[in-house]
Amino acid sequence: MEVLSASNKKFNCTPSRVLNTLSFQEIILREDSDWPNLKEIGFLVIKDVLPKQDINKARDTYFSLFKNGEYEKLNNKWIHLNNHMDPHGCNNHPSKEFLKKEQFLKIIFTEKLNYLTKKILRTEDIILSPRRIVRSFSNLSSRCTLAHRDKEYFLSKNSNNVMTCWIPLGPVGPKYGQLIYLKDSHKKEEIIDKLVTNEKLISKDLDKLSKDLNLNWVRPIIEEGDIIFHSLEIVHSSFDSFSNIPRLSIDLRYSSSLNDHDPRWSSPWRGDDGL
């Protein structure tokens, strides 16, 4: 058990290297019928998917877009010095430009990722939403991502045919922050439906939410090159960073068909697009 904080509120979380975790080499040896089902397990960690060299190049590409002293590279590590004048993803914030860059596109269209998405959703007709999100957090961030479900943001006729892929580009963990999951919360969908606010959030107090639902927060222990898939129903959040080394990540949505796709996700992401 570890004690983390989200928006300066402490909560208990269980780190795990094994829960719902498989290496890429392990999972490709499985028969199709033996692949994990996100509807049943909520989230799935796949290790060793992306080359670290590609991750480092993507980080260099992203942080090099900031031209006003926001970031500096020291001893091969990017340091967050100041926030950009525009909110993340809005106006002239460089994150939108990153979505067009070769290193970003190389990662999201990598052959291994394409293979995994088809296998997990059990179809060859995968739809990757054009709305692709990039996020960055550090100890200079005003807040972290609060407890929510993706079903409130991505509307589908059959949410079991849609999944999120979270790709960290660089360091994650207790010092930097990352995604965490409220274990088995996807099995209490109707109860949690009643907790969703007008802001599409479930709670700003992760400790209280855990105790009220009698469910535990879990932090998958992941390294660079690992990725996480999760269902639209599972409650997840991030937590505070205590480092000036920024966490960078990509957030993708995959659908089994056009009928399962949310048409609002058909345009490129902006921080102020209302979704």
Image (cartoon, rainbow, N blue to C red):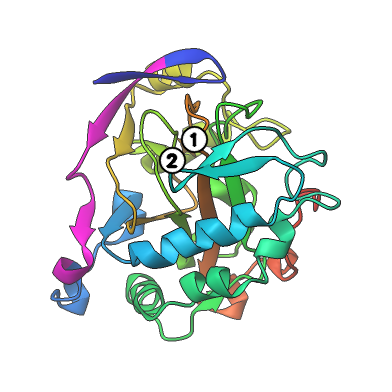
Query: Quick one: 245 or 124, which is closer to the camera?
Result: 245
155 relative position to 168: left or right: right
When asked about the image quadrant of residue 143, the answer is: top right
Q: Eyeballing the image, is 178 above or below 101? A: above
Is residue 15 within the magenta segment?
yes
Secondary structure at badge 2 equals loop
230 relative position to 147: left or right: left
Which residues, given as a range, are shown in magenta? 11-26
When asked about the image quadrant of residue 226, the answer is: bottom left
Mark identifier at residue 90: none
Residue 230, percent from left and from top: 41, 53
Name the residue tied to disc 1: 237
Which residue is painted at 23% across and 50% down in the image? Answer: 20
When asked about the image quadrant of residue 34, the answer is: bottom left
Query: Quick one: 204 or 8, which is closer to the camera?
Result: 8
Q: In the image as oriented, which residue stretches furthest toward the right?
A: 91
**Label 2: few (<14), some (14–19) or many (≥20) C-alpha neighbours in 10 Å:** some
Residue 39, percent from left and from top: 36, 56
**Label 1: few (<14), some (14–19) or many (≥20) C-alpha neighbours in 10 Å:** many
161 relative position to 226: left or right: right
Which residue is painted at 52% across and 62% down in the image? Answer: 58
Query: Quick one: 72 or 219, which is closer to the camera?
Result: 72
Contact (Cβ within 8 Å) of mark 2 with mark 1: yes
Secondary structure at badge 1 equals strand
Q: Eyeballing the image, is 262 above or below 238? A: below
Can residue 154 be seen here? The reply is no
Name the residue tied to disc 2: 179
